[in-house]
Image (cartoon, rainbow, N blue to C red):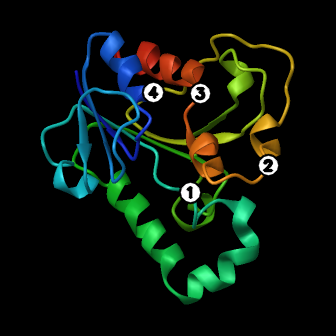
Amino acid sequence: MYVLIACEYSGTVREAFRAAGHDAMSCDLLPTDVPGPHYQGPVEDVICDGWDMLLAFPPCTHLAVSGARWFKEKRADGRQQAALSFVRMLMDAPIDRIAIENPVSIISSHIRKPDQTVQPWQFGHGETKRTCLWLKNLPKLEPTNIVEGRETRVWKMGETKDRWRKRSKTYTGIAQAMADQWGTQ
């Protein structure tokens, strides 16, 4: 299967699909953290290249409800509308199977409700980080390894210059479930 992993610099999801035998490429404005097929540039450059599946992780900076205190400013200067337009473009891509991932966000109230929410603890990680999935022609992910120790470590990271990078990385258990369950669709 020919899979585009949009807005992913980490290579986590890309590598899970590649390990399962798929022709997967990540795409992000940032360089990839892990060597492998990666297009550094706007996803619009490659989105119409005949992909079988699109998994997209659009930036949540202007969308996530965790940043609601800045919404008025972001609406006023257009950042929030631009972020929503980007999500709509991803959802409307000419690709048969699509999954859009984002935390709890205004996508739910401005575009549509998510098809599913998942937690890292359902996939082998003892943490909480409610993650929404908007799906097109893909089934809901089934939990693979429900574990205890449900901590909110991701929110307790403290302020560092790379906090955003750590918070945005996809958990390997979720990436593996995506590759295992959606890679057969």
Q: Residues within 10 Å of mark 3 (few under 14, many from 20)?
A: some
Residue found at x 34% / y 11%? 19
- Marks 2/1 in contact by CB < 8 Å: the verdict is no
Q: Is residue 153 above or below residue 158?
A: above
Name the residue carrying label 4: 12
Q: Report the disc number at residue 19.
A: none
Name the residue carrying label 2: 158
Calculate the distance from the C-alpha at mark 4 to the C-alpha at mark 2: 23 Å
Name the residue carrying label 3: 171
Q: Residues within 10 Å of mark 4 (few under 14, many from 20)?
A: many
Name the residue carrying label 1: 60
Calculate the distance from the C-alpha at mark 2 to the C-alpha at mark 1: 19 Å
Q: Earlier in the sequence, mark 4 or mark 1?
A: 4
Amino acid type, label 2: Gly
Q: Secondary structure at mark 4?
A: helix
Calculate the distance from the C-alpha at mark 4 to the C-alpha at mark 3: 8 Å
Residue found at x 42% / y 59%? 87
Q: Residues within 10 Å of mark 2 (few under 14, many from 20)?
A: few
Q: Earlier in the sequence, mark 4 or mark 3?
A: 4
Q: Residues within 10 Å of mark 1 (few under 14, many from 20)?
A: many
- Marks 4/2 in contact by CB < 8 Å: the verdict is no
- Marks 4/1 in contact by CB < 8 Å: the verdict is no
Residue 107 occupies which quadrant of the picture? bottom right
Q: Is residue 138 above or below residue 155?
A: above
Q: Is residue 26 left or right of residue 143?
A: left
